[in-house]
Amino acid sequence: MGLIIAGDRSGVGKTTVTLGILAYLAAQNRRVQSFKVGPDYIDPMFHTAVTGLPCRNLDLVLTSPHYVQDCFQRHAQNAEWVIIEGVMGLFDGIYHPEPAASRNDYGSTAHIAIILNLPVLLVLNCSSLSTSIAAIAYGYVNLDPQVNIVGVILNQVASDRHLELLTTALKSINLPILGVLRRNAAVAIPDRHLGLVPSSELANISHVFAQLADLAKTSFNWDRLFPLIRQKSATNKATPSLYQQQQSASVRIGVARDRAFNFYYQDNLDLLTQLGAELVFWSPLQDRDIPDRLQGLYFGGGFPEVFAQQLADNKSILQQLKQVIRTNLPTYAECGGLMYLCEQLIDLQSQTWSMVGIIPSTVTMQAKLTLGYRQAIALQNSSVVTAQQTITGHEFHRSQLIAHSKHPQWQLQGVHKSSMASAEGWNIQQVHASYLHLHWGVSTALARRFIQSCRNYQTSLY
């Protein structure tokens, strides 16, 4: 069993509710496994920080129904408590026209609930509502009979009188209230241009989690919640790998991971390890030398624009990276990694900073958010993909390159050809750099090809 925390819309408070539940459960010294619906990086960082276990993304668009089911079963079976945080509103997904998967809410939280056969706890923002809350809740409960909504959490409740009106209204549709958060009770977590400030940047994160645990203890009906989130029998045994472990010698891949680069799907890292890679984590912010004997580099997304000055000041790392990448060291860079490999970065204060200088372009921040799933066709071979290979990825950024490659890596369009096509990405000196975030779980050929490219790398530098 497990419980999905969903919202009636984005910004309703489901992350606060989820973190409160996770913090309270973690305080009981129990093994808590969390999941996040959709292509999110920041919320899973908070989950991982509070539970101590890597949060797993469940994304039907980037992977597949089979992968989502397998991922959930493998990681939930060793936990005592299981919580899934939804994405956007309960039924917000994308249109999928193929007959075998035809849905208007493909990939939504509701779709995940159906595929995993799990109950849903609906978080409702009660601000400026009283009796009308029943109509909203009734609509959510009855829109799709396959979705089992077992109760609601009332958020932004203003007073005892307000709660009385809400309670009376919900009795008319026989929907249990499993928690109440008062208007002034929420714990504030700061945010910025791409969402919440990551947990690694918050000096008081332990205090925040303690506040959330206290809030959850007194605000939720735990007698009703415990049976929903408790695993009937945790095996406490090592789970079998989804992929057969390769027996060939490992390759050393340097993974940039710090406050500037922290957008990684844990499944991607696990897959590389399972296929024979030795992952060496290092910091472009703090380290003065790159790891030795590397056969590949992996730069995830993150916030290089926030730490641009610190990255630029670490000239030793910039010089070493430029030198070693020019020896055709296989390098994979997503979004923030792409930005870091450019010649210059213009930050949020319009200041210009020197970066690695492999990609002959300047990247600048902009007001417009580029967001959405993309179908991508590889226009040429790279260290990760083969020409004409088609995959699905996700874009999420507020920056753009001033100059674009004359030989781009990808032809992009919205999933199911829902938007105009555009070219994007760089392929230069064994560097595969793009704004596109990829989940390698359902396309293991990407990880296999990258590892093979790393194995083939030979240089006299090491």
Image: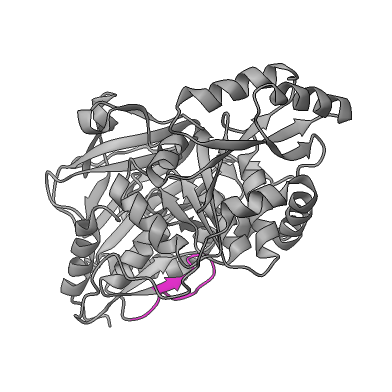
Q: Is residue 286 magenta?
A: yes
At 46% from the left edge and 38% from the top edge, which residue is drawn?
109
Outermost residue on the right side: it is: 160
Question: With respect to residue 203, does 66 lie above or below?
Answer: above
Magenta highlight range: 280-292
**Closest to the observer: 85 or 435?**
85
Specify whether residue 322 is in view: no
At 26% from the left edge and 52% from the top edge, which residue is drawn?
442
Residue 406 image point, x, y percent: 20, 40
**Closest to the observer: 92 or 286?**
92
Q: Main secondary structure of the magenta part?
A: loop
Residue 386 image point, x, y percent: 13, 52
Residue 191 image point, x, y percent: 64, 43
- Tell me the quadrant of the picture where the C terminus can be found: bottom left
Specify whether residue 332 is in view: yes
At 29% from the left edge and 24% from the top edge, which residue is drawn?
419
In the displayed structure, does residue 6 sit left or right of residue 177? left
Q: Is residue 435 magenta?
A: no
